[in-house]
Image (cartoon, coloured by chain):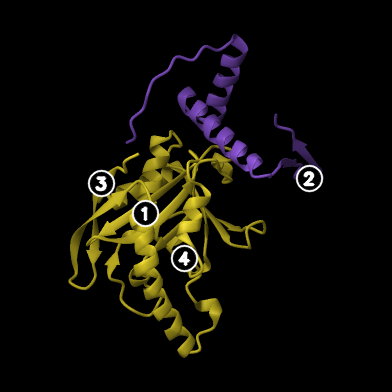
Amino acid sequence: MTAETSTIYLLDKVVGTAVEAELRDAIEEAQLVDWQTKWQPALIVVLQELARQRVPMAQWPQSWHWDWRAKMTQVAGLLAFRGFSVLCAGVTQGLMRVDLNKHAREPGQKGKPLVYIDYLEVAPWNRTDLGKTARYGGVGTALLSAAVELSLQEDFKGRIGLHSLPQSDGFYRDRCGMTDLGADAQYQGLMYFEMTTEQARTFLDEENGV
Amino acid sequence: MMTKRTMTLNLTDAEMRALEELSAKKELTKTAVIRQALRLYQTIEARVLKGEKLVFENDATKEKAELMLL
């Protein structure tokens, strides 16, 4: 199967202008190689610096132990799981894995199917929580938009859901306008968020500059 | 978007009723219900093949019942 590619635009935060990037509806070997050979070394530098500054581990990037190769191998060939990636300047800038088997919990859409975001991570150099300026902005929202678009394509009416790592709670609540359904005791106490059909429409309108 | 292929599906009246009910309840087209069912069936089959069990738990009583798959 060949991955479908669409053109998106990210913000190059170094020069302050929009830059062309690719959104791919797959995570392929090249992306996993980037994760291994580019993300991992960059992350190790960040973790060493955090350790040197005696920053408590609770404040470290909470996805530092994610193994994308294992996560994709685990669901290889399964129709319910899909991968997405964002590439810019020939390098993978963000990755996302989604699950199409889950159902909504928000009272207004309870029991209806949604696109559940299992994992979403941007490259270490694009993170804003590591005390440095991100290289490219908009990678996370591009991946979230892809999840909403997939939800529309699958007739799920734009509904998406996810458990958020604490460092990202504000992003999903304030930036993406998702409904905060509180801590989920069944899922390591992580906050659970959902986007309704109406919220999805608003989110896409804002992303598309409508 | 991925290329799609078309097939004809023959269903009994009861099966069509069940499909229509699910379609209405889940707010999905009939095609989307069938695609969702296929994904779920494939996921369950893969997990059972790995030695896992499919168990339903009653939210209130916490009673568990295993769904036997052939």
Q: From mark 1 to mark 4, how far is it between C-alphas?
A: 27 Å
| Amino acid bearing label 1 | Glu
Q: In this figure, which residue is indicated by the disc labeled 1? A: A29
Q: Residue at x 70, y 32 (%)?
A: B69
Where, quadrant-wise, is the N terminus of chain A in this rendering? top left
| Amino acid bearing label 3 | Ser
**Whether residue A175 is situated above or below residue A84 in the rendered picture:** below
Q: Which chain is yellow?
A: A
Q: Which mark is residue A99?
A: none
Q: Residue at x 59, y 43 (%)?
A: A107
Q: Secondary structure at mark 2?
A: loop
| Amino acid bearing label 2 | Ala
Q: Quick check: can you spot residue A118?
A: no
Residue neighbourhood size for the residue with mark 4, other residues' Cα within 10 Å, grouped as few (<14), some (14–19), many (≥20): few
Count every numbered label the image shows and give the total.
4
Q: In this figure, which residue is indicated by the disc labeled 3? A: A6
Point out the frontmost of discs 1 and 2: 1
